Structure formats: structure tokens, C-alpha cells
Image: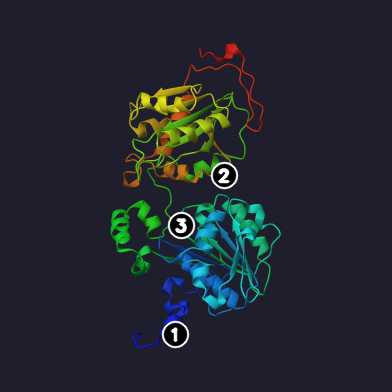
Amino acid sequence: MVRALPPRLLAALDRDFITLAHAHQEPPLHANNGGPWTTWLMLGGRGAGKTRLGAEWVRAQVAGTPPYARHRAAAIALVGETEHDVREVMIEGPSGLLRACPRGERPSWTATRRRLEWPSGAVAYAFSAEDPEQLRGPQFDAAWCDELAKWKHADATFDNLQFGLRLGPQPRQLVTTTPKPIALLKRLVTDARTAVTRASTHANAAHLSPAFIEAVIGRYAGTRLGRQEIDGEIIEDRADALWSRAAIEAARVETAPPLVRIVVGVDPPSSARAGADACGIVAAGITEGGIVYVLEDATVQGLPPDGWALRAVALYRRLQADAIVAEVNMGGDMVRAVLQQIDRAVPVKQVHATRGKYLRAEPVAAMYAQGKVKHVGAAFAALEDQMCDFATGGLPGGASPDRLDALVWAVTELTKHGEWVGPRIRSLGSDRPPFVPYWAQWVR
């Protein structure tokens, strides 16, 4: 029957998303409380069709097309992890808005104004979760939030968006994301006004590369990471993990007090080839009272030795650190040489791993439990994921805990007994370099 259709009707059918949509892409009838929903939360695995759904949903809001829309939307917010993600995925991507809209309905995209404008006069504005303050002031009658679980300032961005959803008879928002166990996402799942749909990568397998299905799904299916990234499940903390997300959240502070010592922990990779382990780079400092503050995770992947060394030295300089602490089990003296090739004045302390990663990490985890380690500022998402997934058997799938290793080296160095660097109080908010007396540079 389809083969018998003329090309004009075939093209029209190809654009008819309502007819072709998967079950998980069809709008829900009711919210959790049985009434109308204001938030549609679509939790899906990688490649499950989340972006296409978001683009088609926005297109339906502009046209007022039922069952996806109840009225025409005049102003729409498009919110992604970064401006780059909004542009490259939500707007210009293979499943983005510009591809989803037929030529006659296609909006004009003005990148300098972060603005999409349809021939009907409807307008969509692009926003980044990196800057929640952008959402103060504008108002909308619909919003599409993509990959909310990756947002850097998830709560602040989402809260500001809610204050702006105040146009039209019933403002609504669609949230499309691969889930992670962040607090905001867990609140949305149980919110009375939320409708939740779920889908795994398998639901859209016919539209994905067979090589992807065979390699990725075959490798990760059934694993903890696979349940999250393929099946779209919200995976809570491992029962046998050294850290819990609740404990890390309890250790989070806005700013660090004056610190007497700062170090940069480095866990170098054994190779720079594609797919090799990342180079863990984590900075931490300690107060006079012995409380450690994790300041930054600057981990990089896929760079040659001079690339990750440049990143570590740049962090050392910016934080006015005292030393770089680098594991040398893999690279030996090469690690010191490559760091000092960038800056010969950088003090590099070489450390050797003589015990297993779990045994090295246990004392650091105990310090978190005692309230002796704090995380400064927003979540270090990738680092904290490794911490909460790390147990006696390591990380799922045998992945390297590169960020965690760098953290452990930094915290261990700061809390070693017998170290003394003299009185050196500084504030990270000051641009003036600290005064260090000549005699205070000696370590007793």
C-alpha cells in the first residue's frame, strides 16, 4: 500500500510524526495524580528518540496540533546543558527543529540572538543551563528541556524556568533526558503534576546503526551503566559503594575558607590513543583546622602527555597551588619530565601505588563520613559518579577510576602527618599572590 502512494503523499506521510510515533513518543493522557499534566518527563536510553520527540513536540506547540498541543504557543523556551548543545542538538542536529519542520514551516535561526522565528510569528529562545540567570525576565507558554540530568545548575535553571512559564491558558513543558539519580529528576518523577513515559534504546533500534546495536548494547546490556544509558532506568547508589550521593551532597559548600595548602592530584593515563583512560586531574586544599576542600575536577581524555601536563600546570598556576602530586606507576620519571617541560619551577611529588585502589580509597571515604572533606560549588558530576559507583570490584565494566584516583592522591597528600609548610593563609577569591617568607618554604 505504501509503495503505491504517489511521491507527494509519501513525503507527507514521512512528516506525519503523530502517525509514525512510537508508543513512548505519544503524549500521556494524565499526570501522576490523574489530572492534566504540566510536565511531561520522557526518560529514555541513548538513541531512544528523545530529541526527535522534543523537536516534533515544539513544532506541534507552534501549530497548535492535537493531541500534542491544546493551543498555539507564541513563546517557547529551549533549554539545554550548554549553548552548544542547544544549537548542535536541539536546533541544527539530525533530529533537531530545523530538520523536523517541513520547508514551508521551517523557522529562521538567528544564532547571535539565540532565537528561532516561525512564519506564523511564534518564537523560541535558546538558553543554557550554565547560566540560570538568563531565564529571569522572559516569559513563555511552553518549554523543551533536553538532557536535564546533565545540567550543571539543574535546580536553579529549572526553578527560574518555572517562574517564566506564565503565558497562555495552560503552560506546559517537555523534559527529555537519559536519567541519572539527581535530586531534581527524582522529585519530578514523583510530582503529582508530572506525566512520565519511558523507553529503552531497543524501542528505536530500527533507526540506529546495526554496528551500534551489536557493539554498544552487546557490551553494556545488563550492566549498571547499561541499565541507565540503554534501558533509561534511574539507578540509585550501589549498596557496596564507598560513597553515597547523600553523603556527597551533605559535604557540598558554596565557597572554601582560607587554605594553608593546595595540591593538584594527577593520575596519568597509560596511553593517549582513542578510547584510552582519561588523565585524572583534581585540585584540593586544606585549612589550618585540617578540613579538606575539593576545588576542581579538570580531568581530560584523549590528549598526549604534553596536553594533559599543560592542563595540570595551568590549574596549579591558577589556584596558586603548592605542588602537583602525580602517580608514576605507569610513566615513571617521564611523568615528572613532561610536567617540568611545561614549567621547570613546578614542584612535582611522585607517588607510587603499592596497594589496591580500593584500599587507598577507604581512608579517604572515611574522612568524608567524618565530615573532613567538602566539595566546593556545583556538583563534579563525572567525579561523583565514579565515587558512588566504586566498590570492592572497582567500577562497572572494568572502567578506570581516573578522577577518583586523582582525588585520592590529592586528599592523601594533604592529610599526611608530619607535613608542615609554614604559615601560608590565602583566599581563593584574591588575585594577589600570597606572601611566602623564604624560611617558610622548607618542609620539616
Q: Which residue is identified by label 1?
A: 8
Nearer-N-terminus badge (3/2):
3
Identify the element where label 3 is drawn.
loop
> Residue 400, image x and y in percent?
36, 40
**Quarter holding the N terminus?**
bottom left
Q: Which of the pair 227/106 is nearer the observer?
A: 106
**Which amino acid is tagged 3?**
Pro
Q: Tell me if 235 is positioned left or right of 139 in this view.
A: left
> Residue 391, image x and y in percent?
36, 41
Q: Which of the pair 121/413 is nearer the observer?
A: 121
Identify the element where label 2 is drawn.
loop
Nearer-N-terminus badge (3/1):
1
Q: Which of the pair 433/421 is nearer the observer?
A: 433
> Residue 190, image x and y in percent?
52, 61
CA gap between label 1 and label 2 equals 52 Å
Q: Which residue is identified by label 2?
A: 378
Q: Which residue is identified by label 3?
A: 179
Whether residue 372 is visible, yes or no, is no
With respect to residue 422, does 120 lie above or below?
below
**Which amino acid is tagged 1?**
Arg
Residue 124: quarter of image: bottom right
